[in-house]
Amino acid sequence: MYVKVNERDNVGVVIKDYKKGEDIGDGILALEDIPQAHKVALKNIRKGEEVIRYGVVLGYAINDIPKGTWINEFSLELPKSPSLDDLENECCKNIIYNLPKPIRQTFMGFKNPNGGYAGTRNILAIHTTVQCVTGVLNVAVKKIKEEILPKYPNVDDVVAINHAYGCGVAINALEARVPIRTLKNLISNPNFGGEIMVISLGCEKLTVDKLLDEKDNNKDNVIILQEKHGFKDMINSIIEMAEIKLACLNKRHREELPLSELCIGMQCGGSDAFSGVSANPSAGYASDMLVSAGATVMFSEVTEVRDGVHHIAKRCLEETTCKKLATEMRWYDNYLASAEVDRSANPTPGNKKGGLSNIVEKAMGSIAKSGSAPIVEVLSPAEKPTKHGLIYAATPASDIVCGPCQLASGITLQVFMTGRGTPYSLAAAPVVKVCSRNDLKLMWDDLIDINCGEIITGSKTIEEKGVELFNYILDVASGKKTLAEGYGLANDLCIFNPAPIT
């Protein structure tokens, strides 16, 4: 058996391993061993002809491909990138307002004292200006979590916002605005309840005034380690300030809030060829329901949108949004070109082992997680949104870089689709894990929250899994722990820094 997405497709994705000579379906015999999730030619394809999946050209056949042949990364010549010229002319050509009706309109969240999106968690975040303070802060946080946090039951966690930026960098370089904006905006993430706590060394280039407004840059919120008398004074100072902040956060309680106060992120990692037909479309259906209910949903990953950029442009509500989309795509093209690579550097060995031949195929599956809602805004990396609805947040595709960018843009929960499997998670927001195939759920039953492999085998529909995911998202937003949260899993924050290191 195989999965065919579009009537134009001349390839299908096999749902299990096939041996040479086996009947794959419709009288197609495997001419060689074909691994699960990889493509098989459904007809004879001549050298130079188009290889089509999702109704789009994945590439051109390097050699003749007889029907029944295994098609992989060695079979295709990559097509040129879609042009970004006059992208605004595509604006509003595919606007869909008839979205799935939401079955819930509220969630139990933490009201934001500063207005805007609400929190799904109540966390004390301790921010840093430079990597040099990480060791001291980690010792303090361990002590706080063991000895102080139990006294404040309404606070979910204490999280150190450590990073590798802050000194030895070209702080005035044009693109230094990206990491600085990221770290500045992280401070106001709704999951942190408006409480500010920053640890500085005292001699770094990323000075506190670059992260905090003048009214917040004071001794109530900032500790400078070079002003302390040794290690014990540093630790005690951090603990004393943390306890004051914890007491404030402990006064917060969950309350019923409209979904217009919820902001979530969509991301995929460790994708396979099933991701674009099971996990990502289910996430897209859930996204449409959330947007229909007034929530804000962000999807990202520039290289995994680049080859589908015209499909995205058609869903933009305004010409200025299309222009911003083109600007972000062009910036990233130049960023890659400066290192003498292009978007073909994106697919990983695991992606290819999972049946994804090239970045075009990966991108077309990736954008399925955005659903079909109109796109109201495009953001630069770590930029804050100004609108509610479906938003494209331009970030690198790397999981551990995309996550912090989305957190800085204000998400308070992330939905993460995977086909190959990755234990990736965030400390500052819950991450819902969604897998594309049954085998991965069986393998990682204690890490995967939602299994969309049932779509591949035909026992569930995209709509059914989308509704299941929608409900699970709102349950997690309301306090239910994800499986990863239960284990305390979290990746280090990797801040996107395209500027020079000196």
Image (spheres, helix red, strand yellow):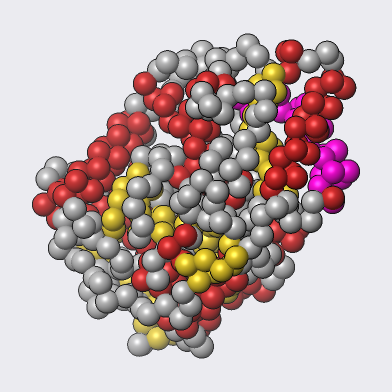
Give the camera-side residue of 147 and 59. 147
Residue lying at 40% horizontally and 40% vertically, measured from the top left: 383
Residue 433 falls left or right of residue 409: right
| Residue 3 seen in render | yes
Give the camera-side residue of 415 and 352. 415
Residue lying at 46% horizontally and 81% vertically, measured from the top left: 103
Residue 124: percent from the left, percent from the top?
68, 43
Magenta stretch, overall SS:
helix
Give the camera-side residue of 53 and 496. 496
Residue 53 forms part of the magenta stretch? no
Residue 431, quarter of picture: bottom right
| Residue 402 seen in render | no
Q: Is residue 137 above or below residue 462?
A: above
Residue 444, quarter of picture: bottom right
Residue 469: percent from the left, percent from the top?
52, 73
Residue 268 falls left or right of residue 175: right
Q: Which residues are magenta?
A: 128-150
Residue lying at 47% horizontally and 60% vertically, measured from the top left: 261
Residue 148 forms part of the magenta stretch? yes
Residue lying at 63% horizontally and 11% vertically, measured from the top left: 203
Residue 289: percent from the left, percent from the top?
40, 73
Residue 49: percent from the left, percent from the top?
20, 61
Residue 50 falls left or right of residue 293: left
Query: How many discs appear?
Result: 0
Q: Is residue 289 above or below residue 299?
A: below
Q: Quadrant of the N terminus?
A: bottom left
Residue 191 falls left or right of residue 381: right
Residue 5, quarter of picture: bottom left
